[in-house]
Image (tube, rainbow, N blue to C red):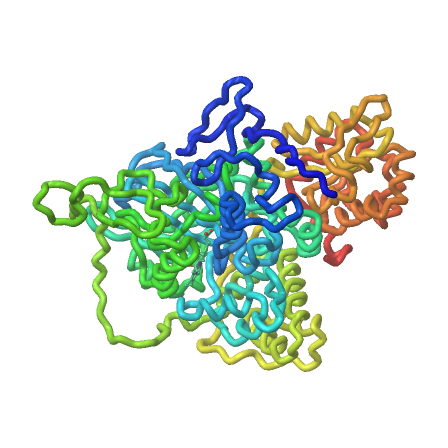
Amino acid sequence: MAKTSRQPTGKPATIHDQKLVRGNGGELHQLAEGETEVLTTAQGGPVADDQNSLKIGSRGPTVLEDFHFREKIFHFDHERIPERVVHARGYGAHGYFETYESLAPYTRADLFQRAGEKTPVFVRFSTVAGSKGSVDLARDVRGFAVKFYTKEGNWDLVGNNIPVFFIQDAIKFPDIIHSVKPEPDRGFPQAQSAHDNFWDFISLTPESMHMIMWVMSDRAIPRSFRFMQGFGVHTFRLVNAKDESTFVKFIWKPKLGMQSVVWNEAVKINGADPDFHRRDLWNAIQSGDFPEWELNLQLFDQEFADSFDFDVLDPTKIIPEEVLEPVPVGRLVLDRMPDNFFAETEQVAFMTQNVPPGIDFSNDPLLQGRNFSYLDTQLKRLGSPNFTHIPINAPKCPLHNFQQDGHMAMRNPVGRVNYQPNSWGEGPRESPQKGFPTFANPEEGQKVRLRAESFADHYSQARQFFISQTPPEQRHIVVALTFELSKCENPVIRERMVSHLLNIDETLGTAIADKLGIKKLPKPADAAVEPRDDLPTSPALSIIENGPESFAGRKVGVLVSVGADAALLNSLQSAVEKEGAVMEVVAPKVGGVEAEDGSWIDAKHMIDGGPSVLFDAVALIVSEEGAEQLTREATARDFVADAFAHCKFIAFSPTAAPLLVKAGVDPKADEGMISLDDPKAIAAFIESCRKLRHWGREMAVKL
Ligand code: HDE
């Protein structure tokens, strides 16, 4: 017979063992010595037993009367809200934006009026196609959404890490997104564009060609959120106090320079650490290494717009930086992680239509459509028009209106008056002086469903992007297109894509056709206007040309063995840290190893858990005996072989040679292999690492 007993109730809840508890209003207070907070229901009723439901006898049925059980399960059952229809997987952080100089000649927006003004921000980075639980290193566009809590209300700059988009009109958004998401009959593939539906749509949508070049480039597999640019994409307007308008494009530039990974590495990172990007941001911020970006503006007037080669309202076009120089106007610093992922990162609601006085829209048809979509989607996702009452969405400035009631209303009016005008002399009124002044752009025309002819050139800037890439970056585009199209089962789709690529760059189109085994080269696709080949290269478009000046913010992984040279390891660590980078030790056991001098080397990873794909550069500090042991471990050989194949700089103690050789790597293969045989070698290694990768090796390893 079962014993009738109450199960022990475990350790009382405390936060971080500091005996801090939250009150009803969310405020933290200290518990007195020996005091334990009492578990309650959501109604505040104290709970006597949270381990056993109420039953008729110890082995009998559970009774409906058990209100505590029902409330607990009911709440759990309702924990999920719909994930975002796009950009479902994301990661956010708090910080501030600091204005460099007053931008009063261009905009009346309060946040840009005073040098040194700091505006609190919340930023959410995301992938577009995958579900909430998908991997971080999918080949995809990254969202870069910034909510500025200005003194004149929230400004949301909801951008991406790519400055153009797939389509020119918002009405096509459901189609592009349906095509990239899992195919509806089979429910896969997840977080991937490498399938027929996506390439079918793309190959039937020539306006997407410029964006395709970006998405097939290294921009779509960033090493870290911290090392990527952000773009507002559309042309917006700045409007000053005299109601004069200037067009503007917004660009975020990372202080640590740009960096991406290679595709083979991305695939392996996704297995080794699906949270690679979130962990990276978390670790950086928690360790006080706050990521920073500069906000740059490309400012121009109507005259420039009229004379520019392309329509500034077309979101599939950029204005090259060499044509219009971006001006840095402030910096964004992320310095605090959310307290709670759901409350902040998940519930944050960005909306393109959130603009303060002094920032306004252009007629870009994609932007106009977005201005409808974002409000609509928040209602669906967050379930009530009162989503602005959620702290992460609430403005941090005074707020007065007569909106009332609705689900979950948290801000409720007091008093009799809930309308205006009223005779009670109470409540807020509109202010023509302070209120949002829509820029009075003269508009007239016939009501039509037409695409402007000025939007018709789909290939010239795609070509400009391709020819602006360095040879390794061009090779990566070829590898990406070949991989993606090889996953299309329908040969018609592959050939249709090649016909577009031939319009972008003949060598590119021919190379892809060859790699896909297409025997007869298709004709170039019909183009609405003749593709141009006179646009000059734009070095600003290359990641490699715009890398970092130092190795700061990066990570070296050091594989150690028993009997490793602790002094060498310590010198390496000092040099890495002096550079502003991080070193992590990988050992056969996570407990660490005993060094040659008898000291103990702590490890962060065991080899299986710390493959070299997690690091920007690697070092092998192993004894002769240790190297011999490691040659027998497949994961140790992979550590070395992958680092070499991914063109990483590899430093090694001379005793590591047998391990290198066993992994198929010649210790003298190239300048990226640095033997730590003299004291100056560490400095040489760090200096090499600033280049991030030894691309000269790439042809030899055929990435
Ligand atoms: Fe979005 N987009 N989008 N988008 N978008 C959403 O809003 C939409 C577009 C972007 O971290 C949704 O809150 C339409 C361009 C980011 O929470 C939705 C069109 C750019 C995020 C939506 C676009 C973006 C979203 C889904 C074509 C770069 C994530 C969830 C006209 C400039 C924000 C949500 C976050 C999210 C609609 C195109 C950026 C459905 C209709 C272009 C960074 O409203």
Q: Ligand 1 is in which quadrant of the figure?
A: bottom left
Can residue 312 be seen? no
Say left or right for 584 vs 285: right
The number of numbered badges drawn on the structure is 0
Q: Where does the image place residue 302, in percent across and percent down from the top left? A: 29, 59
In the rendered image, the quadrant that contains the C terminus is: bottom right
* Residue in the image at 36% along x and 48% along y: 408
* Residue in the image at 34% along x and 53% along y: 385
Say left or right for 177 vs 113: right
Q: Where does the image place residue 130, in percent across and percent down from the top left? A: 57, 58
Q: Where does the image place residue 85, in percent across and percent down from the top left? A: 48, 60
Pick out the residue farthest to the left.
Answer: 423
Location of residue 180 by image quarter:
bottom right
Q: Where does the image place residue 163, in percent across and percent down from the top left? A: 47, 56
* Residue in the image at 87% along x and 32% along y: 623
Report the front residue among 392 and 440.
392
Location of residue 376 by image quarter:
bottom left
- 288 above or below 614? above
Can residue 428 be seen? yes
In the rendered image, the quadrant that contains the N terminus is: top right
Report the front residue among 42 and 91.
42
Pick out the residue farthest to the top.
Answer: 33
